[in-house]
């Protein structure tokens, strides 16, 4: 199916910090938290810190276990279904939560977040354009 390049969302992100940080709402079991996460096209999955799981009341080890091989070493995480709300768009996704407190970053990866949007980046201007994919 051909895509058009009409984007309904224009987002200016801060250029004074490393990476592209986005604010998203994560919901699980009736709790919702605003989370800052890095837009990461190199990450196959969304991975969040143990702290986020604790805030949402996620029973971490009751999820599907997966070990990620990262540049910082192996990271054990457990998968759970959550609801994302970002830029006014809501969708369900299967994401992972780190099993230990050593994981420092929240990542928005391909499966779970990026594939729910058409994305255009103009990093020189710190601009991101998004179009929710229905």
Image: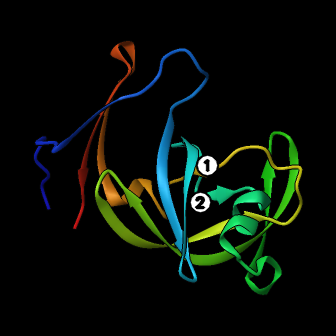
Give me the residue at 68% from left, 75% from top.
79
Please indicate, yes or no, whether residue 132 appears anywhere in the rendered image: yes
Location of residue 105 by image quarter:
top right
Q: Are marks 2 and 1 in contact (CB under 8 Å)?
A: yes
Q: Nearer the viewer, mark 2 or mark 1?
A: 1
Q: Where does residue 71 sit, x and y in percent of width and height?
A: 81, 39
Mark toward the start of the polypeptide (2 vs 1): 2
Q: Quadrant of the C terminus?
A: bottom left
Give me the residue at 48% from left, 41% from top.
22
Q: Is residue 85 above or below residue 70?
A: below
Mark 2 surroundings within 10 Å by alpha-carbon count, few (fewer than 14), some (14 through 19), many (20 or more): many
Q: Where does residue 21 sit, x and y in percent of width and height?
A: 53, 35
Give the number of the disc on residue 97: none
Secondary structure of the residue carrying numbered label 1: strand
- Locate residue 111 relative to residue 6 in the image: left or right: right
Residue assigned mark 1 = 107
Q: CA distance from mark 2 to mark 1?
A: 8 Å
Q: How is the image coloured?
A: rainbow
- Between 7 and 44, the one lying in front of the other is 7
Residue assigned mark 2 = 45
Please indicate, yes or no, whether residue 111 appears anywhere in the rendered image: no
Give me the residue at 45% from left, 65% from top.
84
């Amino acid at each position: 199916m051909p895509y058009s390049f009409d984007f309904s969302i224009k987002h200016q992100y801060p250029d004074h910090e490393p990476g592209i940080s986005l604010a998203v709402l994560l919901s699980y079991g009736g709790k919702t938290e605003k989370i800052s996460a890095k837009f990461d096209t190199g990450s196959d999955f969304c991975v969040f810190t143990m702290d986020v799981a604790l805030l949402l009341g996620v029973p971490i080890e009751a999820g599907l276990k997966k070990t990620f091989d990262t540049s910082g070493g192996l990271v054990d995480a457990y998968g759970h279904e959550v609801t994302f709300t970002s830029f006014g768009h809501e969708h369900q996704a299967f994401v992972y939560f780190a099993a230990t407190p050593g994981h420092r970053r929240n990542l928005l990866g391909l499966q779970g977040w990026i594939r729910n949007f058409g994305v255009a980046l103009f990093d020189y201007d710190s601009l991101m354009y998004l179009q929710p994919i229905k």
